[in-house]
Image (cartoon, rainbow, N blue to C red):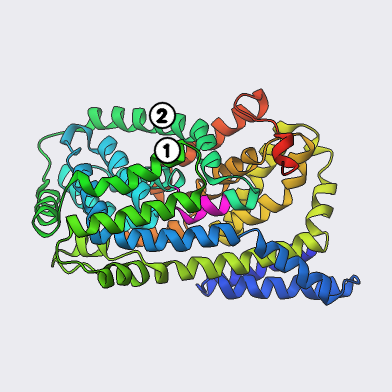
Amino acid sequence: MLVLFIVILVLAISILHYEAAPHIPILIGAMIVTIYGFMIGYKWDYMEKAMVNGIAQGIAPILILSLIGTLIGVWVLNGTVQTITYFGLQLLSPATFLVSTVVITAIVATMVGSSLSAMGTIGVSLMGVAYGMDVSPAMAAGAIVSGAIFGDKLSPLSDTTNLAAATAKTNIFEHIRHMLWTTIPALVITLLIFGGIGFATAQGTADTSQIEEMMQVLQAEFTISVVTLVSPLLIIGLAVARVKPIPSLALGLIVAALTTFVTAPGSTLGDIMAAAHSGFTAETGFEAIDELLSLGGLEDMLFGISLIIIALAFGGIIQGIGITEALIGGLQRVLKSRGNTIASTLASCLGVNIATGEQYLSLILPGQMYEEAYRRHNLHPKNLSRTIEDGGTILHPLVPWGVIGAFVMTTLNVGMDYVFFVFLSLVTPFIALFYAYTGWTLTKRDEQEDSGE
């Protein structure tokens, strides 16, 4: 407990006070744990192997993230993201602005696999419309964040979604399907609340000129065509057919590259490879669109990939020298029931978020700490992956000093009161707790899968 307290203190001061990127603070934390390992008698070779084993768990998601970066770059080049955004913007109407905002940001976040990209682009435009409608900025921001988090969590392109599945050692598509049990009811409740607020407060006619101009620019500068949707629809189809993520994404990338020759006339193979490596840079002159569409590429993923490697090494050394085992041993009385185990997982994820403001750690540390407890209760790993998402990344926006919280307040120009309207995040843990104590939707471990057969 003392070692973890020191590590969390270092992370909190470094990330929150000095606003350091989490990489170096986590590396320092790993050094502190390694020194403690030496003090209690562990050899370097053993601890090095523990860190390597921790990193090995993330090799598959690292490959997936690499493919995702290249895929997004090609999707923007061939017009896939533009087409999805264009049709999403058509959902806007004054009376249902808040509901439409949730839907639009959810669509964009699902397609690009990033809540930050959706909030920082479409979200900014929607905030302008909110002011024109005289809608509370905090409510509008809450709707934007709710939709973005929902889309991000159910997107196979999301780094945190892939990381949660990898941490719990379960298939990404099984993880996403299992998350539907908590996120879909939470989304329905969110839409009902925002729908009620919208119809009760909607007045006059909204100034949607900025959104209309955005749609005109998209249509004028890019090819808006259903042909661009072949690649994402193929990936979705393969996911339904339970094809593994890497071949699914690879096939989607090939199809996206081929459709580029149809939807982006004049593009060469060199252009496609450049977009896959360095991403796409939009130069339309419309700031919101240029920000939205300047993304993708393998290079864009390297920050997250390097962070995942360091965080997994950190988690590996903590687990290797027995810290997680000691903590779980001290919680044995609490973890005797599966309901208490899931509740403790949610609380631990929230605690890491509050202490460090770092969503990656809120997935990795609890995921590794509670793995054996879920195994002991005969719970399938996808129960663990869903729970660390429900308590980690979905609750992360409620921490104003966290990565997303700071981003929202700065980018959307709102105060901390936006957290009271992120209904998706507020509702999800209660749904997870309901399932935990009733046993509904909890899946038992597949013994054949567990034995590797």
Residue 239: image location, x then y, percent: 45, 41
Residue 161 horizontal side relative to residue 197, left or right: right
Identify the residue at horizontal 35%, vertical 27% (top origin).
192
Which kind of residue does numbered mark 1 sit on? Phe
What kind of secondary structure does the magenta stretch mostly adopt?
helix
According to the picture, the residue beneath numbered tag 2 turns out to be: 189
Residue 93: image location, x then y, percent: 16, 36
Residue 174: image location, x then y, percent: 55, 39
According to the picture, the residue beneath numbered tag 1 turns out to be: 423
Q: Is residue 380 in the magenta section?
A: no
The reply to whether residue 202 is visible in this rendering is yes
Q: Label 2 neighbourhood size at 10 Å, few (<14), some (14-19), many (20+)? A: some
Secondary structure under tag 1 reads: helix
Residue 134: image location, x then y, percent: 19, 43
In terms of depth relative to the viewer, which is nearer, 260 or 13?
260
- Give the extent of the magenta segment: 156-164
